[in-house]
Amino acid sequence: MKKWIDLRSDTVTRPTPVMRKVMAEAEVGDDVFGEDPTVNALQEKVAHLLGKEAAIFVPSGTMANQLAIKSHTQPGDEVMIESTSHPYNFEGGGGAVLSAIQFHCLKGVRGILDASQIEDAIRPNDHHFPVSRLVCLENTHNRGGGAIYPMDKIAEISKLAKSKNLLVHLDGARLWNASVATGIGLNDYAQWADSVSVCLSKGLGAPIGSLVVGSKVFIDRVHRFRKMFGGGMRQAGIIASAGLYALDHHLDRLKEDHKNAKRLGVGLKELRGVSIEPKHVETNIVIFDVTETGKTAHQITETMKGLNVLIHPFGKTQIRLVTHLDVNEEEIETALMAFKKVLG
Ligand code: TLP
């Protein structure tokens, strides 16, 4: 089999042999009846890690975000969100279809918003306007190049939201990366949000699964909608066990991914026509611009594929690389050499 160096996403990781063994041996039950001991253990563990009352296991990050939006809002409500965020751009228009909300998009800097922008966007209490209900944040920010939300900004936004009766949902698909990079606890981040979604199938390397965390009352509401959205699973302990294993064994090692991403950022900066600011590589995502190379992102992607390196074009001029469990330091150097050949 061809050995690819796959830098398209941290979702491409495959369960390790030990993880597969753990999955095969997982104790299971019917989770729609709440009887799967492994799912229950995972939910308790993640709720505890994030300092919330309860958690619910769902198949994907998309479902986790959409369930949170659905459970916080009424049709016609407005959800304030950064314009390059995942729930707005990459979830199939789910906000409009599943919750009948409208997004109010605000332009951030690498995905990061300022409390003042939210304050300015809150609708007056007048029946002409939609009701401002929810603020969605993303940490780390995918399109922002894995940018970490500064804690003071989160706190300021959250305090503003509370004072204006707005709720806060945090898309924390890669909150693990933010926490490992900064040393700030997952619960310290989560305290500022009414709900948080986290993914096990990205940097942590589990094959499937995300969770939503929040208050007991909120998670009870999510439970009802999870059934409605078709996300109730039966012997889900088989996949939940991979998540438990990943949390115990793959969390601390995210720092290796961050180191590898930084190395890519520094190496790419040396190449002609590549525009990147290595100090902006804060976690495991590297986004760079190739306008000045005279080639399109698509052309570069195709040529790199010929050299066994898979990368992800973002539009005509940008490329995204993501480091993860299945690429090591040596492969990062090989990928950089391939970039050198293609762009050097
Ligand atoms: N992101 C995927 C793609 O959808 C772009 C990726 O390769 O990065 N929130 C954030 C911040 C995400 O990056 C993703 C996935 C999700 C939610 C959705 O998770 P899944 O793919 O499990 O539905």
Image (spheres, rainbow, N blue to C red):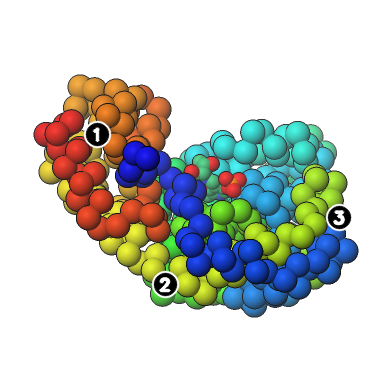
First in sequence: mark 3 or mark 2? 3
- Give neighbour class at mark 2: few <14, some 14-19, many 20+ (Cα, 10 Å): some
Give the amino acid at mark 1. Answer: Leu
First in sequence: mark 1 or mark 3? 3
Question: Which image quadrant is residue 252 in?
Answer: bottom left
- Give neighbour class at mark 3: few <14, some 14-19, many 20+ (Cα, 10 Å): some
First in sequence: mark 1 or mark 2? 2
Q: Would you say the residues marked 3 and 2 are in contact, meaning their CB atoms lie under 8 Å apart?
A: no
State the residue at coordinates (65%, 59%): 239
Question: Which label number is shown at residue 307?
Answer: 1
- Figure check: 220 above or below 101: below
- Figure check: 33 above or below 128: below
Q: Position of residue 185 (x, y in %)?
A: 50, 75
- The label nearer to you, 1 versus 3, is 1
State the residue at coordinates (20%, 22%): 294
Q: Is residue 107 visible?
A: yes
State the residue at coordinates (80%, 57%): 234
- Figure check: 293 above or below 106: above
Q: Position of residue 303 (x, y in %)?
A: 26, 27
Give the amino acid at mark 2. Answer: Asp
- What residue does disc 3 label? 224
- Give neighbour class at mark 1: few <14, some 14-19, many 20+ (Cα, 10 Å): some
Give the amino acid at mark 3. Answer: Arg
Q: Secondary structure at mark 3?
A: helix
Question: Which label number is shown at residue 252?
Answer: 2
- The label nearer to you, 1 versus 2, is 1
